[in-house]
Image: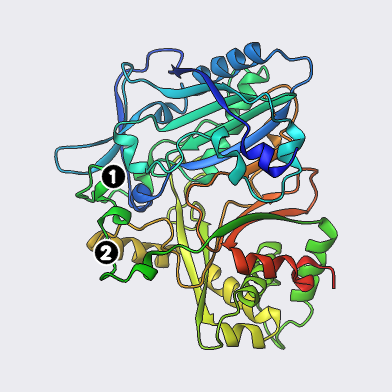
Amino acid sequence: MTKEEIATTNVNILKKSNVKPQKPLGKKECQLVTFDLPYLAFYYNQKLMVYKLGTENFEETVEKLKDGLALVLEDFYQLAGKLGKDEEGVFKVEYDDDMDGVEVIVAEAQGIEVANLTDHQEGINKFQDLIPYNKILNLEGLHRPLLAVQLTKLKDGLAMGLAFNHAVLDGTSTWHFMTSWAQLCSGATSISVPPFLERTKARDTRVKLNLSKPSDAPEHAKSETNGDVSASVVPPMRDRVFKFSESAVDQIKSKVNANPPEGSNTPSFSTFQSLSAHVWLAVTRARQLKPEEYTVYTVFADCRKRVDPPMPESYFGNLIQAIFTVTAAGLLLSNPIEFAAGMIQQAIVNHDAKAIEERNKEWESSPKIFEYKDAGVNCVAVGSSPRFKVYDVDFGWGKPEIVRSGLNNRFDGMMYLYPDKNGGRGIDVEISLEANAMERLEKDKEFLMEA
């Protein structure tokens, strides 16, 4: 099937329904905290998981998934609720038994086979109809479900498109939920690790925000660019997946660690830091920046173990902060790769409980609602983590064939890291870049490890 044929394949919506927790839970609410609030003007966080189905009947599979969802929502009931605001204008997530619950959409795309999705390295822009809530802001969770699931019947499988409200949870919580849901569908009578729902234990400052509708978000509130039409022209973007095998990842890590600074007590560079430096340099080359132009590397770092007191891994919510590293392009490219890795490592090490506290206080004194693309000039920003065991999400008929991110929250330089499907240390790098830079990146043998 050609790209053009895939692009025109219709996804037909068959029916929509809602799933609530299986038993009544009464009224519950929890204030959103400083770690959650900056994401109100991001879009819903989208994932696509594609499964092969053998003898399983699609309709029975859908019912099994919905039954498991009703069970798992007893623990993760916040995802069955809505965003709300109290009388003082403080955002909260609230649940009541009369709310709609999670939206479940059942669809079919009989023209698409699993192989059409797994063989496609051009990102997933051709398959956005398989994922719900395209371009829906998290702020709309005031009136919409906080989780939408689309189950699409393929010729030989099932595509599970997911849209999570990012103001309510981060990647760690997302995959905790997905793993728990899969456990119940696979026959477990209870989930192995219940979510820790007391998000105010991480931060309890009450921050009032004057936001109530999408037009209040910064993307809509910005004034026109003084009549300068060219400033608002968005260059064409491309998405691409680059697969780095276990041996390629090991080679990159060895290269970065080959020349440790003399007399340094600095720990060796991790796989993440090494691959980050490799990508940052390659993207900077591909962009053909002037030596004096700045470039930023942004990491959305998990703070569960960094805050004081530390929070459990099962903390449900957002417990991430953006960590920024900046330098001039000429400086970055004229130095060996360990220079870039060292800056990234230092920024991560420095982001301790004290730095987190200072960032929170600064934000609380003057709250800024960021757009999803406010990650820095000429940036490379990494979301997701190869540590997330995304290929272990097995609902009872096998592991997913592919896990990818949707189109929401993508911008020039946004990158997602996923583990290789077959295990081991291989990593898939899913990145969005301006089209000309992407073309140069695809020919960069040093980046592709073909040199």
Q: Visible in this render: residue 279?
A: yes
Q: State the residue at coordinates (75%, 71%).
A: 444
What residue is at 29 percent from the left and 35 percent from the top?
142
Residue under numbered circle 1: 214
Is 53 on the left or on the right of 70, as rendered?
right
Query: On screen, 449 above or below 185?
Result: below
Q: Residue at x 45, y 50 (%)?
A: 319
Q: Which residue is mark 2?
A: 224
- Can you give x and y, in whole percent of width and height, for residue 446 in the image? 78, 73
The image quarter containing residue 54 is top right
Q: From the viewer's perspective, is 289 left or right of 257?
A: left
Direction from residue 291 to residue 269 in the image, left or right: right
User: Callout 2, which amino acid?
Assistant: Glu
* Snapshot colouring: rainbow
* Residue situated in front as seen by the camera: 420 or 86: 420
Say which of 132 and 231 sits in front. Answer: 231
Frontmost residue, 16 versus 380: 16
- Callout 1: SS: helix
Q: Are marks 2 and 1 in contact (CB under 8 Å)?
A: no
Identify which amino acid the numbered label 1 is placed on.
Pro
Q: Nearer the viewer, mark 2 or mark 1?
A: 2
Report x, y in % for residue 201.
37, 45
Q: Position of residue 55 (x, y in %)?
A: 78, 14
Q: CA distance from mark 2 to mark 1?
A: 18 Å
